[in-house]
Image: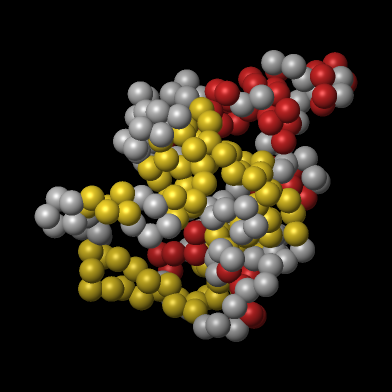
């Protein structure tokens, strides 16, 4: 059983809590070539090449591959039956130390040090007093990126119930709703959104992915991950 941390916007987190969101699309990296064959999603043995240039089957993985054998990619989120947990912005109590390494821009790399006590962690909706700015450097409470949230503090868990691949613009109206689209013109029920749902979803998608080079217009291939909310997952 695999457990993978994912990120969501606050709006999408709320949509999962309210039961409006049961699906998420994530850009496939690397993207398959436009002229590749039909793409399958299943367990497969990727082709490896040894030092002599000889091909051989690699270890079995779950992912996507083209029938023509020109492209393949492991799914980084797991497979049906695996779990996803939400990584949230949070506060940690600790301090910053300078490392001997430097970034590409010449700045010294920094490392945040904290202890393992639960009292050193706060969720974003329970802020501590006297939050420090990173430049302060001394011991205290700091806001931290969701990228650095330990799995043990995860409070939102999802079980994967389906995975497939498709082009972004192939999303159906039904899937727009499953993505959590909330747009009700003239008070009409969500089932009557028609094409308006695509407009709302496209705007939402671009607000997150356009700056990364994966706009709605670019129409990238995506992992389509269906999930259900679970109370918790059994972790080691």
Between 38 and 158, the one nearer to me in the picture: 38
Residue found 81% across the figure and 46% down from its top:
18
- Residue 22 position (above or below residue 218): below
Quadrant of residue 191 in the image?
top right
Q: Is residue 192 visible?
A: yes
Image quadrant where one finds the C terminus:
bottom right
Residue found 74% across the figure and 47% down from its top:
16
Residue found 55% across the figure and 75% down from its top:
93
What residue occupies the far left of the structure in this picture? Answer: 52
Image quadrant where one finds the N terminus:
bottom right
Image coords of residue 79 (percent x, y)? 57, 53
Residue 45 is left or right of residue 40, and the answer is left
- Residue 99 position (above or below residue 159): below
Image coords of residue 188 (percent x, y)? 86, 20
Residue 23 is left or right of residue 2, and the answer is right
Residue 158 is left or right of residue 76, and the answer is right
- Residue 10 position (above or below residue 170): below
Image coords of residue 2 (percent x, y)? 56, 63
Residue found 49% across the figure and 38% down from its top:
40
- The image shows a total of numbered marks equal to 0
Between 110 and 198, the one nearer to me in the picture: 198
Between 15 and 69, the one nearer to me in the picture: 69
Q: Is residue 208 visible?
A: no
Residue 217 is left or right of residue 127, and the answer is left
Image coords of residue 234 (percent x, y)? 67, 72
The structure's colour scheme is secondary structure
């Amino acid at each position: 059983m695999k457990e993978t941390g994912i990120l969501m916007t606050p709006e999408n987190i709320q949509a999962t809590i309210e039961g409006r969101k049961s699906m998420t699309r994530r850009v496939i990296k690397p993207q398959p070539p436009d002229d590749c064959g039909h793409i399958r999603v299943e367990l497969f043995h990727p082709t490896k090449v040894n030092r002599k240039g000889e091909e051989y089957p690699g270890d079995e993985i779950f992912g996507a591959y083209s029938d023509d054998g020109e492209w393949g990619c492991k799914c980084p989120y797991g497979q049906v039956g695996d779990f996803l947990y939400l990584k949230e912005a949070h506060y940690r109590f600790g301090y910053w130390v300078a490392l001997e390494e430097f970034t590409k821009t010449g700045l010294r790399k920094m490392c945040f040090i904290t202890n393992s006590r639960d009292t050193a962690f706060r969720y974003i909706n329970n802020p501590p007093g006297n939050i420090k700015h990173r430049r302060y450097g001394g011991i205290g409470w700091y806001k931290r990126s969701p990228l650095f949230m330990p799995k043990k503090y995860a409070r939102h868990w999802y079980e994967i119930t389906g995975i497939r691949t498709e082009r972004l613009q192939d999303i159906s109206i039904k899937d727009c709703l499953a993505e959590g689209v909330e747009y009700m013109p003239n008070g009409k029920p969500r089932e009557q959104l028609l094409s308006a749902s695509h407009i709302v979803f496209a705007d939402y998608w671009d607000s997150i992915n356009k700056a990364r080079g994966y706009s709605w217009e670019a129409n990238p291939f995506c992992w389509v991950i269906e999930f259900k909310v679970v109370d918790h997952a059994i972790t080691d």
